[in-house]
Image (tube, rainbow, N blue to C red):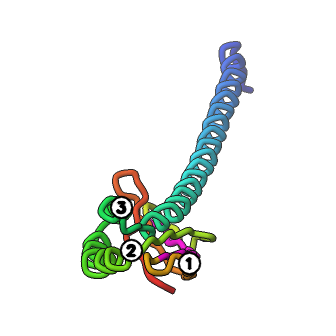
Amino acid sequence: MTTTTDEERVSEPDRLRTLVRNGLALAVLLITIFTATLAWRSYSEGSAEHDTMAALEAAKTRTSTLLSYSAPTLDADLARAKQQVTGSLGQRFDQIAQSVIAPSARQDGLVTTATVVRAGVVDAEQDRVVVLVFVDQLTTKASQPQPTRQTSQATVTMEKTRGTWLISEMNAV
């Protein structure tokens, strides 16, 4: 027959308490990790959605600015338009502005006001968002003060450059 000493009887409940405490500590740790993961996911999704909405708003504003100009303030308008674009679109815009827009605007006394009337996100990735814009342009000529309305659609690719959403591509649809 085996006899247990008082020391063995005390240590068995102590082992059980230690096991329960360690199990509870592990459960609290796992719950904390799970909660932190959910919070991080929620924050990341919210941040991505915020970036997408910021790109959408920038696409509306920057497209209007890019496509609006007036003969009397043409140099300032083209300089402001150039600030709306990035990458190779900036170079292409310079070429179009100097070879097409500036000569006709000065010659005909053009005033063009573009307004984005509707826009929606087509595709969104980190630091790159494609937006479909619907644009109304009102244009007057010195010889014809009655405005002409032109509507168009374009896909505008926005890229986050140094923390700012700029137009990197624009394609008529």
Tell me which residue sits at (55%, 59%) in the image.
Answer: 57
Q: Secondary structure at mark 2?
A: loop
Tell me which residue sits at (57%, 46%) in the image.
Answer: 40
Question: Which image quadrant: the N terminus?
Answer: top right
Q: Secondary structure at mark 1?
A: strand
- Residue projecting furthest to the top: 6
Q: Earlier in the sequence, mark 1 or mark 2?
A: 2
Q: CA distance from mark 3 to mark 2?
A: 11 Å
The answer to whether the residue labelled 1 contacts the one labelled 2, judged by CB atoms less than 8 Å apart, is no
Residue tagged 2? 109
Q: Secondary structure at mark 3?
A: helix
Q: Earlier in the sequence, mark 1 or mark 3?
A: 3
Q: Quadrant of residue 122?
A: bottom right
User: What type is the residue that disc 1 sits on?
Assistant: Gln
Q: CA distance from mark 1 to mark 3?
A: 20 Å
Residue tagged 1? 146
Q: CA distance from mark 1 to mark 2?
A: 13 Å
User: Is 153 a magenta residue?
Assistant: no
Prevailing secondary structure class for the magenta stretch in the rendered image: strand
- x and y percentages locating residue 104 in the rendered image: 33, 80
Q: Is residue 6 above or below residue 47?
A: above
Q: Nearer the viewer, residue 4 or 137?
A: 137
Image side of residue 96 versus residue 64, left or right: left
